[in-house]
Amino acid sequence: MKNQVTSIVQAAMIAALYVVLTFIANTFGLANYAIQVRISEALTILPYFTPAAIPGLVIGCLLSNILTGCILPDIIFGSIATLIGALGTYILRKWKWCAPVTPILANALIVPFVLIYGYGFLIEGVSTVYCYGYYFITVGIGEIISCGILGMLLLHTLEKYKNKIFA
């Protein structure tokens, strides 16, 4: 019973932190659209430490997308990308340096479709394939910054205290 309560509390705290960090990034215009550096995506390394982070991240992403005014496809597929990324981080937890790989790839592959088909972000005179490539690169760079750099800094910082925080 104690483990269930701990997991629920951890998931809730992660979801709340994800929402707050997304709002901070959104204030600076970094949370949504073609160029994204969601600071909250750094949290996608947390399944490395605890499986409770998986529902926390998905719920946090879902709430963030709703509260920042995203369209329904973004709410759905953005949350699915976060779920895939979080599950991948958990599955690859034996290899620390792989922690940010699946969140980076999931978002870089899925979010461009949302930008093109959900928001209609097409570049005039440029084919959809090239637009997808452009958004793959821009979203991928943002994810590398958020997950690969900030996330790994967070992972290394939390690793020192993992037995106290995630016991």
Image: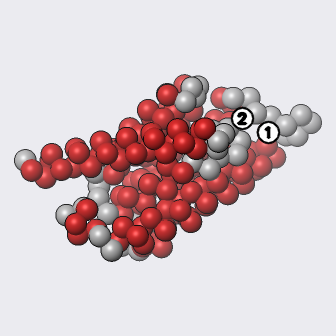
Residue 32: which quarter of the image? top right
Q: Residue at x 48, y 73 (%)?
A: 97
Q: Residue at x 29, y 59 (%)?
A: 50
Image quarter hosting the C terminus: bottom left
Q: Residue furthest right?
A: 125
Please name the amino acid that badge 1 sits on: Thr
Between the C-alphas of marks 2 and 1, the distance is 8 Å
Residues marked 2 and 1 touching at CB (< 8 Å): yes
Q: Vertically, is 116 above or below 47?
A: above
Horizontal relation, residue 163 to residue 155: left or right: left
Q: Which residue is mark 1?
A: 128
Horizontal relation, residue 79 to residue 90: left or right: right
Residue 126: which quarter of the image? top right
Circle 2 crowding by C-alpha within 10 Å: few under 14, some 14–19, many from 20: some
Label 2 sits on a secondary structure element that is: helix
**26 or 85: which is nearer to us?**
26
Q: Residue at x 23, y 69 (%)?
A: 163
Q: Is residue 67 visible?
A: yes
Q: Which residue is mark 2?
A: 116
Please name the amino acid that badge 2 sits on: Ile
Q: Is residue 109 visible?
A: no
